[in-house]
Amino acid sequence: MIEIHNIHKTFNGNKVLDGIDGVFESGKMNMLLGASGTGKSVLLKCIVGLVKPDIGSITYDGRIFTNNKLDIKQEIRRKIGMLFQGSALFDSMNVYENVEFPLRMLTDMNRAERAERVEFCLKRVGLENAGKKMPSELSGGMKKRVGIARAIAPHCTYLFCDEPNSGLDPLTAIKIDELIKEITMEYDITTIVVTHDMNSVLEYGDNVMFLYKGKKLWEGHSSTIMDTNVRELNDFIFSNRLMRDAKKIEQIEEEEQRQEDEQNAKK
Ligand SMILES: Nc1ncnc2c1ncn2[C@@H]1O[C@H](COP(=O)(O)OP(=O)(O)OP(=O)(O)O)[C@@H](O)[C@H]1O
């Protein structure tokens, strides 16, 4: 579990995060949702330690991360897996070497142990025969899968994904979300996903935080997000035409049901 309390961050007079609190539980898909420029990535960077908050605290399973000793921070960092927007694979390494890389850097596994772990992770993401391929030979979805295998290889406890399905077609995007969710539950990982994709949120969001201009305006399970009274969140959701149409259909169905109930009651 990761807890953040009262996170503030200002860049050159531009207030990007304005007092954010939150709890991210393990085994759940925790999602940071919001339009471009609302501070989602900066918040994620604060949590990972790439950006230092001006005020606020972050704890990992009860251990303070912010302003703690370097060795404690490094110990926590070793348990973090990252999936970057563009997958960020090393172009000069093949798939196997990419997944093996964090094991070389972060663990004292010998060659045979590394090979076993790489093969396990590649199999887990459905790429058991792709070890020798170079990143340039992979589709966008395959690159994301390699990114996931690399992130979980050192047995990560925490997994951070920055727009994991950006640039993917809708079907592949759903499969990547599904894989992240399965892995999160299977290994009880604390996962935080930055997204502005409502499809992802509705399908997989166990705990969704909506950020707007550096503030958290709404938080809850995805099943309740369509019923929100928060105007900014409503505007965000229904800026998408498909969402507007879905809402209209839902309202028509509700009205039909209401009329049917009324008629049944009269009988
Ligand atoms: N290192 C930095 N220095 C100065 N300003 C920054 C820095 N990093 C981010 N910002 C600013 O912080 C604001 C929020 O940026 P952030 O990347 O967190 O947005 P976001 O919600 O993740 O958007 P997107 O969905 O487009 O990635 C932006 O105005 C951005 O220009």
Image: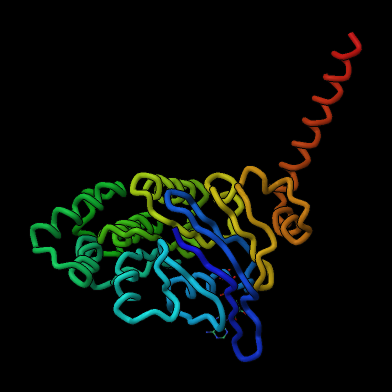
Q: Residue at x 51, y 74 (%)?
A: 57
Which of 37/132 is in front? Answer: 37
Q: Residue at x 84, y 26 (%)?
A: 258
> x, y percentage for residue 186?
35, 44
Q: Specify the quadrant that holds the N terminus.
A: bottom left
- Would you say residue 194 is visible in this rendering? yes
The colour scheme of the drawn protein is: rainbow
Residue sitting farthest toward the bottom = 12
Which of 251/267 is in front? Answer: 267
The quadrant where ligand 1 appears is bottom right
Residue 109 is left or right of residue 18, and the answer is left
Count of numbered circles on the image:
0
The answer to which quarter of the image holds residue 82 is bottom left
Give above or below for 132 relative to 18. Answer: above
The answer to which quarter of the image holds residue 94 is bottom left
Residue 12 is left or right of residue 204, and the answer is right
Q: Residue at x 45, y 77 (%)?
A: 66
Residue sitting farthest toward the top = 267
Which of 218/139 is in front? Answer: 218
Q: Specify the quadrant that holds the C terminus.
A: top right
Residue 134 is left or right of residue 211, and the answer is left
- Would you say residue 166 is visible in this rendering? no
> x, y percentage for residue 8?
60, 78
> x, y percentage for residue 104?
18, 69
